[in-house]
Amino acid sequence: MQNTDVEFGYKTFVLANSSGYIFNFALYDGATEQENCPVEKNDLGCAGDAVVELLKPVESFTGKCVYFDDYFTSHALLCHLKTIGVNATGLLSVLRSRKLPLLPNEEFANLRRGQFCQLLDPINGVVAVRYKHDQVYTFMSTEFGFDPLVETEKDGKLFSVPNVFYEYSRKRYKVNFITESMRKYKVQLRNRKWWWPVFTYFLDLTVYNAWRLYHEASQTPMTLFNFRSELTKSWISGADVNPNVGSAEDEDEFDEEAEDEEIEEEEIEEEEDEEEEDGD
């Protein structure tokens, strides 16, 4: 898969709500051919396909907006989502942003912090905003534009940021927290089986989701590290840590098998003795 940190292997796409709870995922293992696929019809690619598949279980999008990063964002995807009633906002990659008739990124990088420009597609209702912060960002949205400007403070200075930049940064924080948590706390056991990394990843994902539910419902918040520690302790305390100790039924079965083996050995020895006598 091109334009990703790791181009080879299984990729996991997740759909999370604003609190960080993951309620849908898709495991990508390569391009597939699908009949009557709206993605191929609208030329959205595998990234757009993943977004459409993840959103299928959602019953209503009234008052909601979907956010995704630069790998997924494209003009075609936002137009397609708009036709099915889904508002979306995403960061546009540098390669895709070069196609927009805006001031080039190289020239925009020389401007002072806080400068921005906007491009509107009135037919499809898509807005593109290029903004200079610590670096140049280009956003596409069917929900937000540059207006209203939001005052933010950085290094003791006030800056006016476009509304689309503010909303995207605020909502993407939880997803970034998921990524960092999965990197910091994960199963460290290694195995040569090809499926083992996939299995341990989803195990970590399940533990994270359980922690999110606990964090929302409990009156005594617990960090993810402490939650994993307590969960591991409960698993160990409830497991049979001595593999040599079995139940009474297992011991009886073992004794019966041992007696059968002794009888078979005696029969074999008797047959050998009879053969020796016949030979004499």
Image (tube, rainbow, N blue to C red):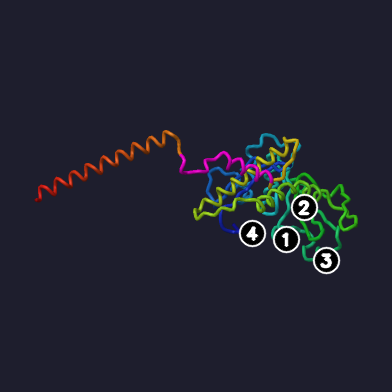
The residue located at (52%, 54%) in the rendering is: 191
The three-letter amino acid code for the residue at tag 1 is Arg
> Pointer 3: what residue?
110
Q: Magenta span has 234?
A: yes
Q: 230 or 54, which lies in front?
A: 230
Q: Provide residue 45's location: percent of width, then percent of height.
A: 61, 51
The residue tagged with tag 1: helix, strand or loop? Answer: loop
The three-letter amino acid code for the residue at tag 3 is Asn
> Pointer 4: what residue?
5
The image quarter in which residue 116 lies: bottom right
Sequence-earlier tag: 1 or 3: 1
Sequence-earlier tag: 2 or 3: 3
Looking at the rendering, in which quadrant would you find the N terminus? bottom right
> What are the residue bounds of the magenta stretch?
226-245
Relative height, residue 136 to residue 14 (above, below): below
Residue 271 in view of the camera: yes
Q: Provide residue 86's location: percent of width, then percent of height.
A: 71, 41
Q: Which mark is residue 128?
A: 2
In the current view of this chain or complex, which residue is farthest to the right? Answer: 157
For marks 4 and 3, give the CA distance. Answer: 27 Å
For marks 4 and 1, give the CA distance. Answer: 21 Å
Which marked residue is nearer to the observer: mark 4 or mark 3? 4
Q: Is residue 30 left or right of residue 23?
A: left
For marks 1 and 3, give the CA distance. Answer: 16 Å
Sequence-earlier tag: 1 or 2: 1
Q: 69 or 255, which lies in front?
A: 255
- Decide whether the magenta segment is chiefly helix, strand or loop: helix
The image quarter in which residue 268 lies: top left
Q: Provide residue 182's location: percent of width, then percent of height.
A: 65, 50
> Pointer 1: what residue?
98
The residue tagged with tag 2: helix, strand or loop? Answer: strand
